[in-house]
Image (cartoon, helix red, strand yellow):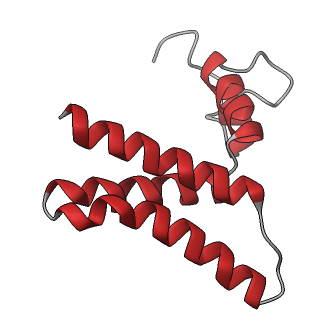
Amino acid sequence: MSRECRGKQPPSSAAEQRGEGGGPSHPLARFEERVLSVFRMDLQLHFFWSFSRTVLGLFWPPMLWSGIVVTVGKEAFDIAARKGWSWGDFWWGMAGAGAGGAFVFLA
């Protein structure tokens, strides 16, 4: 066992592994925090759901419109459930459909 390893305990918590225990944090951990502050998990769901539905247009062309239809339909159901229209969900869903469309047409 090397001299540097003696006496050191492995990090026990996720915060310590990310460097939040008082030491310098890893640059990718800081990047992840910044990305998640803008691109929250629920918005990622809308983006990737719409993207994946639109990309299925490679196999069946009518699916090219499904990302937009599903995004608008989901927001309509939210209004019916009295949750209200979420512009964040809508725009990230539209971005996913746009990215999927670009992927399909450039592929």
Q: Residue furthest left?
A: 59
Which image quadrant is residue 104 in? Answer: top left
Is residue 23 found left or right of 17 in the rendered image? right
Q: Residue at x 58, y 69 (%)?
A: 72
Image quarter where the C terminus lies is top left
Measured as percent of width and height from the top left, residue 88 is found at 73, 53
Q: Nearer the viewer, residue 40 or 70?
A: 70
Residue 74 pos. (x, y %): 60, 76
Identify the residue shown where x is 77% and y is 63%.
86
Extreme residue toward the bottom, this view? 81
Residue 83 at x, y percent in the picture: 82, 80
Write the residue at 24% across / 60% down: 56
Residue at the extreme top: 3
Identify the residue shown where x is 45% and y is 18%: 1
Choose between 54 and 29: the one closer to the eye: 54
Q: Is residue 33 above or below residue 91?
A: above
